[in-house]
Amino acid sequence: MPITPTNGGVLDSLLHLLHRASQRAEAEFARTVSVKDLTSRQHVVLSAVAQRDGLSQTDIVAVTGIDRSGTAALVARLVRGGSLQRRRTRRDARAYSVRITALGREKLAAGSKAVRTADEHLTAGLSASQRTAFVNLLTRVAGRGNQARS
């Protein structure tokens, strides 16, 4: 017997639906990425650093929205894997400047292709105008470009 919506129950909650959509998006990325040790969150960090080499980990938190401890773990893993380089800054010996390597750029290119493919698969059932509206609404819900109201 198929499972059906619960008419206002937890299975229909925005929180649960966003979680399910996130799981599906992660699965699509993992299925399509050619670099098997690259996660979508690592790709986001690589993308942020590639756009502005020399970011601090605090800057990466601000740009990506990934929490501090998550960013530290992602950067550390990308440094160990050779995709990023991390050096102490001259202005603040406690802070790191993060730069992307040639290997990181290769992984970024592979990840970017996977993101485009995953995006296409995730929105295949939407018209162009629905996709635009969906992206705009998700951007607002995520708090980008429009701070959440308290």
Image (cartoon, rainbow, N blue to C red):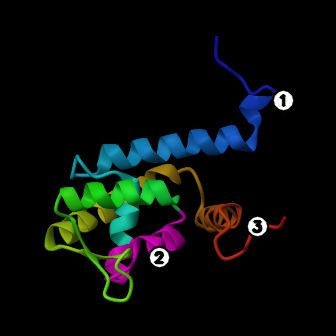
The residue most toward the front is: 93
Q: Nearer the viewer, mark 3 or mark 1?
A: 3
Q: Amino acid at mark 1?
A: Asn
**Which one is earlier in the sequence, the residue at label 3 or at label 1?**
1
Q: Residues within 10 Å of mark 1 (few under 14, many from 20)?
A: few
**What crowding class fits label 3: few (fewer than 14 Cα within 10 Å), some (14-19), or many (20 or more)?**
few
Counting from the top left corner in percent of width and height, residue 99 is at 26, 77
Q: Quadrant of the C terminus?
A: bottom right
Residue 23, numbered label: none
Mark 1 — residue?
7
Q: Residue at x 33, y 61 (%)?
A: 75
Of all residues, the one furthest to the bottom in this rendering is: 91
Residue occupying image coordinates x 70% and y 61%: 141
Looking at the image, which residue is at 37% across and 49% down? 29
Q: Quadrant of residue 131?
A: bottom right
The number of numbered badges drawn on the structure is: 3
Mark 2 Cα shell of 10 Å, populated few (<14), some (14-19), many (≥20): some
- Going 41% across and 56% down the picture, which residue do you hit? 41
For residue 59, which numbered disc appears in the image?
Answer: 2
Which residue is denoted by mark 3 in the rendering? 148
What amino acid is at disc 3? Ala
Q: Is residue 139 left or right of residue 30?
A: right
Boundaries of the magenta span: 48-65
71 displayed left or right of 66: left
Residue 30 within the segment the image draws in magenta: no
Q: Secondary structure at mark 3?
A: loop
Instruction: Report the front residue among 125 and 24.
Output: 24
